[in-house]
Amino acid sequence: MTRVAAIDCGTNSIRLLVADADPATGALTDLDRRMTIVRLGQGVDRTGRLAPEALERTFAACREYAEAVKAHGAERLRFVATSASRDAENRDDFVRGVLDILGVEPEVISGDQEAEFSFTGATKELTGRADIDRPCLVVDIGGGSTEFVVGDDHVRAARSVDVGCVRMTERHLVRDGAVTDPPTEAQVAAMRADIEAALDLAEQTVPLREARTLVGLAGSVTTVSAIAQELPEYDSAAIHHSRVSRDRVREITDWLLRSTHAERAAVPSMHPGRVDVIGAGALVLLSIMERTGAQEVVVSEHDILDGIAWSLA
């Protein structure tokens, strides 16, 4: 048993997992799992730089996480940074800040590495289950990018494309510095066209339609599941390994893209940091299901963060 700490810093959120990993049994026992919305990718698509206020929000979360890692006595720590910090001109400022606070240098990984971690984290505990047909297509819908991975027990093909809930929202749904409330039909159509072009790109590398089971990861997917179940609050246990039909995803996506900020914020399972970007994230999920023909998505709370933890074990 090894006590490990994994940090995943994405475009929209930064997350911590401290866990005991047992490679012999394949069990990962959570001691501390938390998420903070920091919007590190704020404006990156437009400016090419990490905003000073976004960096400070991220560093504040890192200070909290450093205390938690120390309190649990983790033996190993790995910090992985994804899309926003990969794209930014001033990513060295980010690297120095994280190193000062946590004592480890963030690994700004490639999209392919990101996909490998996501696949391991999402599928390790599904191995051998009779109700999971292989191969699996794992889709990790992040803030700045979406990872596609097809595999059986191991990855066969992977691709990362630059469509995520934050990037699509900023690119298509913002007018005069504010998110359109609700978006126009023309805005939604432009966003859909962008997503379809990204799926064309992904399909050049990954045989999306060969998968027998679609596994969906990250906050956009888990929030859609929470809405589908009409949960009175966000409940990880109820969401993990839930299944949502394509018809239900379409219903929810249509509502999210017609609703106002206040209506979305009133959903009891909605994280405040997702209110403005959930419509775009849900549309990415729906587009993937329509492209692949998947009748349902298996929702996983275990993702790249768990894959990072396993890499330490």
Image (cartoon, rainbow, N blue to C red):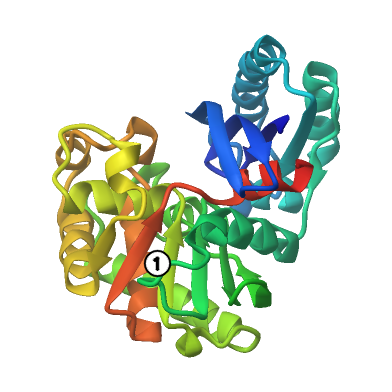
* Residue 55 x %, y %: 67, 28
In this rendering, would 72 be left or right of 228?
Answer: right
Q: Nearer the viewer, residue 27 or 234?
A: 27
Residue 307 visible in the current orientation: yes
- Report whether 34 appears left or right of 161: left
Residue 286, picture quadrant: bottom left
Amino acid tagged 1: Val
Q: Which residue carries the number 1 mark?
A: 284
Left or right of 259 in this view: 130 = right
**Element marked by disc 1:** helix
> Mark 1 packing: few (<14 Cα in 10 Å), some, or many (20+)?
many
At 71% from the left and 33% from the top, the residue drawn is 1
Q: Nearer the viewer, residue 306 or 209?
A: 306
Residue 23 x, y percent position in the rendering:
70, 46
Q: Is residue 62 above or below residue 185?
A: above
Q: How many marks?
A: 1
Measured along the vertical axis of the image, is residue 307 above or below residue 285?
above
Q: Is residue 275 visible?
A: no
Residue 119: give x, y in percent of width and height.
Answer: 60, 62
Residue furthest to the front in view is: 24
Residue under the point 29% across and 55% down: 242
Q: Quadrant of the C terminus?
A: top right
Percent of width and height locating residue 75: 79, 24
- Camera-side residue: 31 or 197? 31
Instruction: Check the image and report above or below for 7 versus 259.
Output: above
Residue displayed at 37% across by 42% down? 178
Which quadrant holds residue 184? bottom left
